[in-house]
Image (tube, rainbow, N blue to C red):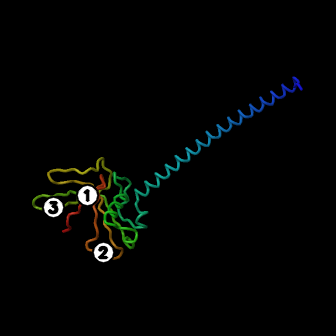
Amino acid sequence: MSETKETKIARKSVIIALGIICIVLVAGLVTMIALYTSAISSLNSQVSNLQKQVNDLQNTTGFWRFGNVPVLGPNIDFSPPINMYRAITIALESDGWNASSLINMTVNAYLEYREIWSNSTGSGWTLLHEVTQPTENYSPVQVNGTTYRYIWDIVVEPNGTMLLPPPTYWVDAATGEIVPTPPMY
């Protein structure tokens, strides 16, 4: 049996139509994969940004570790390299404070500029002033055995009663280093 010319043309037309349909389907599939890949990439980027924001908030405030601790101090609208909440976190973690040990406690935090000295006659400090305005450089300055530092002065006090003396921490506002506190007089 021989095929007729019309049958051959019809078969070729079907093959061409199927080929065109396959090309359109493949092109549509490739387009959809590209769109979904782009959407997934965008969503992954958003998730990464949100995760970074969560980490920044946790590292900035630190109070997710310590519960709901009342903090007293000036409401300053600027932050040195180490902000108040990060300094509080550094101080509290250095001495093993946790959410349980801070129940019924209040944390006081003030940014201060202090003169700290140590020489053959002794050591001590002087509060030069409380910091209420931003400064260009919060780095410590050393002059003839005296160090001038921007310090977060952090005090933990129980609500209602006073510990003598209350735990006090000094955290360098530029480096986050815990500065040893000289003896109280």
* Residue placed most toward the observer, 8 or 173: 8
Disc 1 marks which residue?
Answer: 129
Total marks shown come to 3
Mark 2: amino acid: Met
How far, Cα to Cα, is label 2 from label 3?
26 Å
How far, Cα to Cα, is label 3 from label 1?
19 Å
Q: Mark 3 or 1, which is nearer the eye?
A: 3
Disc 3 marks which residue?
Answer: 123
Q: Quadrant of residue 169?
A: bottom left
Rate crowding at label 2 as few (under 14), some (14 to 19) or many (20 or more) other CA atoms within 10 Å: few
SS assignment at label 3 = strand
How far, Cα to Cα, is label 2 from label 1?
25 Å
Residue at image point 44% right, 56% down: 57
Residue at image point 59% right, 44% down: 39
Mark 3 and mark 1 lie on one chain; the one further toward the N terminus is: 3
Q: Mark 2 or 1, which is nearer the eye?
A: 2
Find the residue positioned furthest to the bottom: 161
Residue 99 is situated, as x and y percent measured from the top left of the image, at 40, 69
Disc 2 marks which residue?
Answer: 162
